[in-house]
Amino acid sequence: MAGHLTPIPMASQSVGPLKGTAIIPGDKSVSHRSLILGALSVGETKISGLLLGQDVLDTAKAMSAFGAKVTDHGEGNFSVNGVGVGGFSEPVDVIDCGNAGTGVRLIMGAMSTSPINATFTGDASLRSRPMDRITDPLELFGAKSYGRTNGFLPLTMVGARDAHAIRYISPHPSAQIKSAILLAGLNALGETTLIEPEKTRDHTERMLSGFGADIETVEIKDGFAITLQGRPELTAQDIVVPRDPSSAAFPVCAALIVEGSEIFLPNICLNPTRSGLFTTLVEMGADIEFENNRLEGGEPVADLRVKSSCLNGIEVPPNRAPSMIDEYPILSVVAAFAKGKTIMRGIKELRVKECDRIDAMARGLETMGVTVEEGEDYLIVHGQNGEVEGGGTAQTHLDHRIAMSFLCLGLASKKSIKVDDGHAIATSFPIFKSLMTDLGASITG
Ligand code: S3P
């Protein structure tokens, strides 16, 4: 994935209501973690429902390069024969994580406290994302990193010998920072504590506990303190990956804005650290029913029934941002069809995602005839009360969520829309086009 890929121009247009059942692929965050924790365990971890997105496949390849035996049994069923905590061997080639910030950051954490070296790279998007937010704390364990100016990839990580546990206050609300440190802490002597200012997605904590680590989260004055005892023996697990709420967001939002739609999405992960979008949509007036609420594999899940709705703009509470951080692009699209302004503040982390998502959404929405206001950490979308002009071409900057967001906009705008390049969609939601088409959407490219 590090090389240049030929762009795939795509287009969408309004052809009528979306109807039917959407079977959403496995969650990307849980898929990465299943492979990495499987590789760090003793025994055979069996994974079903793994996301077959390129990001996750790159992580699977990386785990093989570090010595685990990863076997693809077809249809999202994988097994991982782990090497145990501290058992990684040195890769003989560069680790290419493609487009995946989660992949590269978690893997750097996981190898940084073993006495091996590894060089990481990725595609043009990943090579322009900050890595110092990960390498700075990993250096406190004794690891060293040598990257380009500002710590950009390609980067070589020299793992620490005899790493000692650290206590670290994360300057950003980021599950990737938290997870990199916890994975590093696995092979460090003593108790590693990570303090996060706001609660971010907690799959790493849940899964580490499931694999047998001693880990505890305590709410403190300045956020949440997560403490992990170093050098546990992790035991292989059977994992059923829940369905990705961040992917479900696209058909859900498309159904809300395309008149006459009614769709059903079974088994969607509704972990409270991930479900902020659904809370926001309901506050805007969305008709979403959450049926059959239950726990599956340690994660809350429900079946969603969604009907097209007249929506009102709202102010999204900034403290909700970590629980819907990947959903602001598609929320901005929904906001364009709502009545009144939708105000999204406290979202500066969006500037360091696969692209600068505040800028990409603002420019793209303007191209589609929508008025926006933008600042360093906010985006305000002026809703058009159901009447979005469309007709433009959105620049996607190698960002899957920008591409899918605008393709959803085109399903309800007056004129068809184009995106310059949809190839990144395969990183997280390879069946996006066919799933949407099966619901009745017109998406080409
Ligand atoms: C992820 C964490 C988030 C999110 C990303 C997946 C994870 O990134 O945007 O898509 O799986 O830990 P940050 O931790 O940088 O907010």
Image: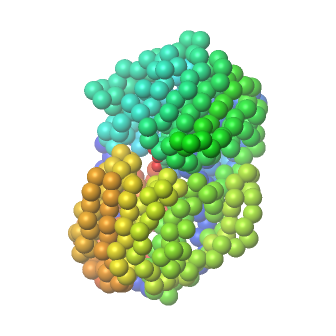
Instruction: Locate residue 154: give its quadrant.
Output: top left
Which residue lies at the image location 68% right of the left edge and 62% below the top edge?
301
| Residue 320 image point, x, y percent | 50, 58
Instruction: Locate residue 403: give its quadrant.
Output: bottom left
Count of picture labels: 0
Which residue lies at the image location 57% right of the left edge and 61% below the top edge?
275
Q: Is residue 286 above or below residue 116?
A: below
Is 344 on the left or on the right of 60, as rendered?
left
Which residue lies at the image location 24% right of the left edge and 75% below the top edge?
369
Quarter of the image that includes the N terminus: top left
Which residue lies at the image location 33% right of the left edge and 53% below the top edge?
377
| Residue 390 image point, x, y percent | 28, 76
| Residue 440 image point, x, y percent | 49, 79
Q: Can residue 190 be seen in this view?
A: yes
Foreground residue among 23 and 379: 379
Foreground residue among 283 and 263: 283
Name of the residue lying farthest toward the bottom: 260
Name of the residue lying farthest toward the front: 221
